[in-house]
Image: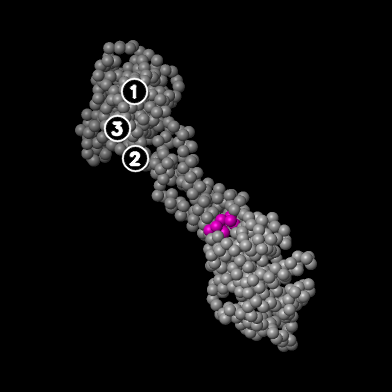
Amino acid sequence: MNLVKLSWNYLLAKPLNTGLNILLLSMGLAIITVLLLMQDQFENKMTRDAEGIDLVIGAKGSPLQLVLSSVYHIDFPTGNIPLDEAESVSKNRLIKNVIPLGMGDNYNGYRIIGTNHDYLELYNAGFREGRPWEVAFETVLGQEVASKLELEVGSRFVGSHGIGTASHAHDEHDYIVVGILEKQDNVLDQLILTALESVWYTHDEDHDHEKFEQPVATSGFPSSDQEGREVTSLLVKYRNPIAAVQLPRYINSRSSLQAASPSFEISRLFELLGVGIKLIQGLAVVIIAIAGLGIFIALYNSLKERKYDLAVMRTLGASKATLFVHIILEGFILTLLGGLLGIAIGHFFLWLLVINNEQGALSGLRPDIFLAEELWLLGIALITGVLASLIPAWNAYRTDIAKQLTGS
Amino acid sequence: MLSTKSIQFEYTGVPAFSIPDIHLKAGEELLVLGESGSGKTTALNIIAGLLKPQGGKVIIDDVDIYSLKEDKLDKFRGKNIGIIFQKPHILSALTVMENLQAANFFAGKKENGSISTYLEELGIGNKKNAKVNTLSEGEAQRVSIARALVNQPKLLLADEPTSSLDDKNAEAVVNLLKQQSKKLNAVLIIVTHDQRVKDHIENHLTIGNRVGRNRHTEF
């Protein structure tokens, strides 16, 4: 017998009360855990995905939409821009490098992105298997695409029009998998990469099979083979810091193009989301406070029934301080369990969210990563428990033994 | 072993009590008689170190117990005094076994395997792992006796141990207390208004007299 066991036995003697309080506390903490995990990983992921991209140039529209669609591949593109205009803007002396992107098709919900080999280099993508594409319709798959769709090097598939699943299939020509990337922990994991030419040819009415065999451009723009070729957007790397000031203004003043800075748009996005996050956080804090109150009320009420027990403990040799610790321990054990359970539920929630949003913005978040902040959460839970049991413990400390036992 | 010196006690609003001086050697027995409200339970609480008197001393084993600090007194009581209350007052969340282990723990004594022995001797060995609320009144009483004995006290105090029992059980309980205190060579004090107990213990002390006209009883 020791004090921990004693307190534990008294908690077990009231399973419903104990269970309810643990559940309430753990729910509050689970919400905060999910928010913490999402915020941390989301910001990390957002930063990782946008690394090396100073500016996105695309069709006019919402700058946030342009960034979301071209950098993170979650929103719809703002439209396409003519190839010749894209080429001319790329010649600007403030630009160090440009990666063209062409979008519009998907396979089972995974986006097919037409680009060049610079895009792979941007993320230092290593190959698990195979090689980069060399001719049109050869594709390289992100790790998640390959494993989820069970595709291997040599597999063939037919893309369909649109960014989401379904709509009509481009069944005139199928893609062939020539490479699979290693796990990148960034947006590449969920993309199907191919040459910009593939995206062009697949939308052409006539199919000139001879040019399908030609090697594609591995850097810069492909040479235009016919009038009216377009790209969706350009990922730009600045040559020097002055570009950050001059280039966006210069491009936005040209009528058909717009430039958006990922870092600026994302901080704006987080500002918008921040209000919602604050609201949910507030809710979680209220739940935790209610849990604390619940623990306080449960201990306070049970103490009335337990005054005899406490007095008996004194006659058996327990000091006032021992009883004080005994009651505090009850709050402590309760909140320790609630805290641990809350963190576990938080990770479980995130896991549920992730497996239900495989292709959405949440994909790639990992429920198995633990943060140092979670220890703080546990600390907050324990402090709640100790605070909630302070007054009951003080009452236990003051219990008059003789009065309790004889009723006089 | 146990001696009290001119103990005085008063409740607010009620005239003061005085308790006749008591001197008992190890292994001796004393029956404290008195009507309800005569202050005999108060006397027992004072001797048990549960209630500090306004005046006088309680000396157990050469220790003036009210000169001890509060937590020292708690430990001293746990180690040296076994108390059996009118109601069993068993710790509700624990099993019978755990109640006795708790007694060991609070007194700061190691569990030494004597728990099972006591439970067997008191005829409740089969209730070891029973929850308290499944016990009959008689069984609960025995558990509280076992709990008072488990730390091998030098002083055994019982407050109305027989009041809720029938003749047969009352006699059994008194005999049990006598027998166990003999075994431990402990002082046994039973406080009661139950006339059935009278014949079993030689030394009697009747209290319930106001200060000023109390009758001194010498031992």
Vertical arrangement, residue A77 with respect to residue B36, above or below: above
The residue that disc 1 covers is A153
What's the amino acid at mark 3?
Ala
Label 3: how many residues lie within 10 Å, few (<14), some (14-19) or many (20+)?
Answer: some
Q: Position of residue A11 (x, y in %)?
A: 58, 55
Mark 2 near mark 3, Cβ–Cβ under 8 Å?
A: no
Q: Find the magenta span and give its range.
A: A4-11
Q: Position of residue A209 (x, y in %)?
A: 30, 12
Mark 1–mark 3 Cα distance, whole angstroms, equals 17 Å
What's the distance in space between the residues labelled 2 and 1, CA to CA? 30 Å
Count residues near mark 1 (Cα–Cα under 10 Å), then give few for <14, some for 14-19, many for 20+.
Answer: some
* Residue A23 spot, x, y in % from top left: 55, 48
- Up the image or down, B152 lies above or below B96; here it is below
- The image quadrant where one finds the N terminus of chain A is bottom right
Secondary structure under badge 1?
Answer: loop
User: Which amino acid type corresponds to the residue marked 1 in the rendered image?
Assistant: Val
Q: Nearer the viewer, mark 2 or mark 3?
A: 3
Chain for disc number 3: A
- Closest to the observer, A272 or A302: A302
Using the rendered view, name the quadrant where residue A187 is placed.
top left
State which tag comes first along the sequence, 2 or 1: 2
Mark 2 = which residue? Answer: A47
User: Chain under label 2?
Assistant: A
Q: Is residue A304 visible?
A: no
Q: Residue at x 69, y 84 (%)?
A: B219
